[in-house]
Image: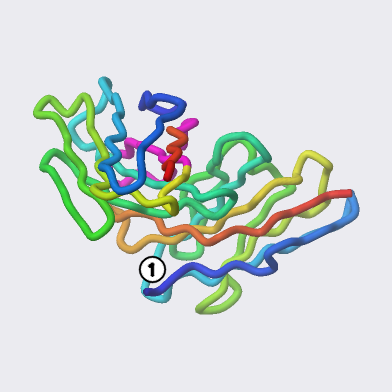
Amino acid sequence: EPEVTQTPSHQVTQMGQEVILRCVPISNHLYFYWYRQILGQKVEFLVSFYNNEISEKSEIFDDQFSVERPDGSNFTLKIRSTKLEDSAMYFCASSEILQNQPQHFGDGTRLSIL
Amino acid sequence: DAKTTQPPSMDCAEGRAANLPCNHSTISGNEYVYWYRQIHSQGPQYIIHGLKNNETNEMASLIITEDRKSSTLILPHATLRDTAVYYCIVRETGGFKTIFGAGTRLFVKA
């Protein structure tokens, strides 16, 4: 069964450094998403992306964050200058045509900011 | 905020059916009910979704009440591997974001 893959599984970064989290969505999916989950808390929506544009973003997704689809298969989340509070699991998801189709999630990247 | 209410935890004996309830009394006509689960710290796993009819797939059954104000996810023969947090989510057709609540932590016991 096709799945969303994320790399790396664990990323350790010094505070203030830039980090890029990578995702390969399911191949025929057109909508892409990033979510995060701080340890012990709920899964939170960050951003959705379609047709090379952000379609919706949350308050969390401030100017420090950006997303990109650099080629036909990858989808990335960049955090420009990481803060301690950015430490979390980051999940990528993708879905087919928007309508009622479910989002399928990857297993996440654990980001640890030191 | 999440538009659903779920019990924080439930127990189920291995091999028995697990029935997980969800209240979504403010659901509107174009909103679907989705169920996901999260095992340990893995990514949320899609289980099933529906609008108003009952649905069944290889993982589970979804029973939605006629007034659509509540639903039940049924795992027909729970195994130890079904121990997870189960999320009931309401999302409108055409909506981008999935809003997760706290979910129900299901413990399947031998």
Give the extent of the magenta segment.
B85-103
Circle 1: element type: loop
Q: Amino acid at mark 1?
A: His
**Label 1: how many Cα within 10 Å (few below 14, some 14–19, many 20+):** some
Which of the 4 image quadrants contains residue B10? top left
Task: List the single residue furthest toward the top.
Answer: B25
Write the residue at 25% across / 50% down.
B60
Query: Which residue corresponds to the image point at 89% horizontal and 50% vertical from the top-left?
Result: A16
Kindly identify the residue that appears in the image at 11 percent across and 42 percent down: B53
Q: Position of residue B5 (x, y in %)?
A: 37, 24
Q: Is residue A82 left or right of residue A4?
A: right
Q: Point out residue B30 in the picture as x, y percentages from the top left corner.
A: 21, 37
The quadrant holding residue A108 is bottom right
Q: Is residue B83 left or right of residue B40?
A: left
Residue A2: percent from left, percent from top: 40, 74
Residue nearer the viewer, A72 or A12: A12
Label 1: which residue? A29
